[in-house]
Amino acid sequence: MHRSNFQIVGFTEQPSLAELVELGREKKIPVMEDLGSGALFDLRSVGIENEASVGDSLRAGVDVVTYSGDKLLGGPQAGLLSGKSDAIARIRKNPLFRALRVDKLTYAALEATLLAYVRGQHDTIPALRMLRLSAQEIGQRVEAVAADLRKRATKLKVEIVDGESITGGGAAPGAGLPTRLLAVTSDDNSADELAAILRKNDPPIVARVEEDRLVLDLRTVFPAQDDAIVSALEKL
């Protein structure tokens, strides 16, 4: 079981995949790994370490790897299995396969996502595009949003600060990427009150509160949505 959504720190140790595979072969027991996140993309290229990829597991000799179609893979909600052909064939013959298989719409979305990987079109997958954004790229957008806010929402104090995008949750626990943050304060409302008001906006805007400031990370906001954030804050 890969620790895809939690961390154990301190005096801890775990066997390597190579050791488990060797033990499995010695005892004639198949080795199956629940990888969780389903990373097909080399996350080390964006500065995220210690998050194994499906390829890493298969190269280590694991018989069957299970992982999600969403999360780091960036496709639809689904469960995937990769591994040795004989093991996968046995699973496909199980009667449960027919009961648990996904529908055609999920297959279509999954095919489109996987073809983007094959073609090297990583920026067409929202999750990967967000991971690949640099702090400088995000900073340029934040500066534009801040300038707009200072004109349209004069009662708010707007700052641009260095920060970190926390990628962990369902995958890559504890991993962070450098980013530039939009920090907002108001004389009329606390940061918690501002965050609550934005959550009730249409569409809802989910921010976080740090050091008594409302903080927005544009890494997970599409550029076309920047004006919606400005408009919501202008209403305040």
Image (tube, rainbow, N blue to C red):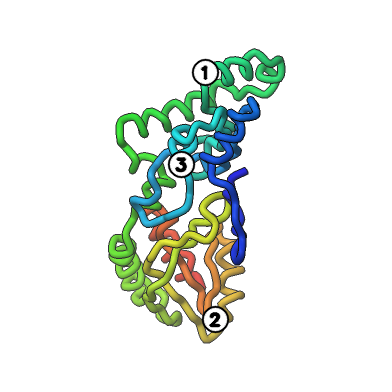
Looking at the picture, does residue 106 appear above or below residue 207? above
Residue ID at (39%, 52%): 131
Residue ID at (55%, 28%): 63
Q: Residue furthest top?
A: 93
| Image marks 3 and 2: residues in contact by CB distance under 8 Å | no
In-image side of 9 versus 146 (left or right): right
Q: Quadrant of residue 159?
A: bottom left
Looking at the picture, does residue 21 appear above or below residue 236? above
**Residue 192, percent across and down?**
60, 75
Label 3, on which residue?
53
**Which tag is nearer the camera, tag 3 or tag 2?**
3
Label 2, on which residue?
212
**Which tag is nearer the camera, tag 1 or tag 2?**
1
Choose the circle earlier in sequence order: 1 or 3: 3
Q: Amino acid at mark 1?
A: Ser
- Residue at mark 3 to residue at mark 2: CA–CA distance: 38 Å
Label 1, on which residue?
85
**Residue 103, percent across and down?**
59, 22
Looking at the picture, does residue 46 appear above or below residue 213? above
- Residue at mark 1 to residue at mark 2: CA–CA distance: 55 Å
In this rendered view, identify the residue nearer to me: 159 or 10: 10
Q: Amino acid at mark 3?
A: Ser
Residue ID at (63%, 22%): 101
SS at mark 3? loop
Q: Residue furthest front?
A: 26
